[in-house]
Image (spheres, helix red, strand yellow):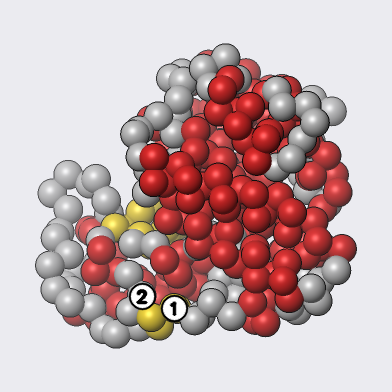
Amino acid sequence: GGGAALDVAKAIALMATHPGTLFEYEDGRPGARPIDKQVPYWVALPTTAGTGSEVGRSAVISDEETHVKKIVFSPRLLARAVFADPELTLALPAKVTAATGMDALTHCIEAYLAKDYHPICDGIALEGLRLAARALPRCIEAPADIRARSDMMMASMMGAIAFQKGLGLVHSCAHALSTVADLHHGLANGVMIDRALRFNLESSAEKFERMAQVVGLEDESGEGFLGWLGELKARIGIPADLKAAGVDRAALDRLSSLAFQDSCHLNNPRPVREDDFRRIYTEAFAS
């Protein structure tokens, strides 16, 4: 299945051989139980090109009471085999293709921008970006194009491999939106990506220029790259802003608080405060 189904498989595999309850294994939780036993042999068959969970060591599970996403992490959770067959994605509806594709694209971009040092991940992220930039709109406009579907599946896995380096503020914004407004994770990333990444222009100008080169833009500036993201969103049917996505502006304070509490932005190339998140969300509500 998609990322959610694959993460559920990891959680089931974990609990098949470990005592207690799932969230007692939450990553970073004080006194968390250790994942110290082998888990059952399991095989991943991704049916979307988005999260890359099939090559990931984490399960992201929402708490039913708070709706906050929690992470369970261990190398033991890796699938023992992955069958990445792009034919399994040929029948995906356009909206699912677009939302999951924006998740893959965001993984590549944020992994490249993340402040930690990992040039191997940087190279993987840039190639994933190159593939997705060309393939994602093609998957919407010609859904049966097996080459485009294959490139998106590869970009998805590359993004997930690259983000072991870290992510950034776009994911913190998206996680809060999923908690508060129940937005699909990839859709939330897609809505916020050009709005939130503008915050990083002043700290990462050279990297934005490199990304503009990778996707083949004539305008190789950071502004050119953000403009391209906006055009891509419009082309594949991602809402331009939070108002268009149906998010209630009354949730602004809670969104800002939850985004700041999220750990993804700790590896953002520029430090982010809660009032920064509030400003980013405020601008994302504007048409």
Q: Mark yes or no: residue 68 visible.
A: no
Q: Residue at x 41, y 66 (%)?
A: 55
Q: What amino acid is found at the position of numbered circle 1 in the picture?
A: Val
Element under disc 2: loop
Any mark on residue 82, and which? 1
Q: Mark yes or no: residue 223 visible.
A: yes
Q: Are marks 1 and 2 in contact (CB under 8 Å)?
A: yes
| Image spot of residue 53 (x, y percent) | 46, 64
| Image spot of residue 250 (x, y percent) | 68, 30
Tell me if 281 is positioned left or right of 123 in this view.
right
Q: Residue under circle 2?
A: 79
Please say if 148 is above or below 26. below
Element under disc 1: strand
Give the position of the N terminus as an image quadrant: bottom right
Cα distance, mark 1 to mark 2? 7 Å
Seen from the viewer's position, the closer of residues 22 and 210 is 210
Please say if 248 is above or below 161. above
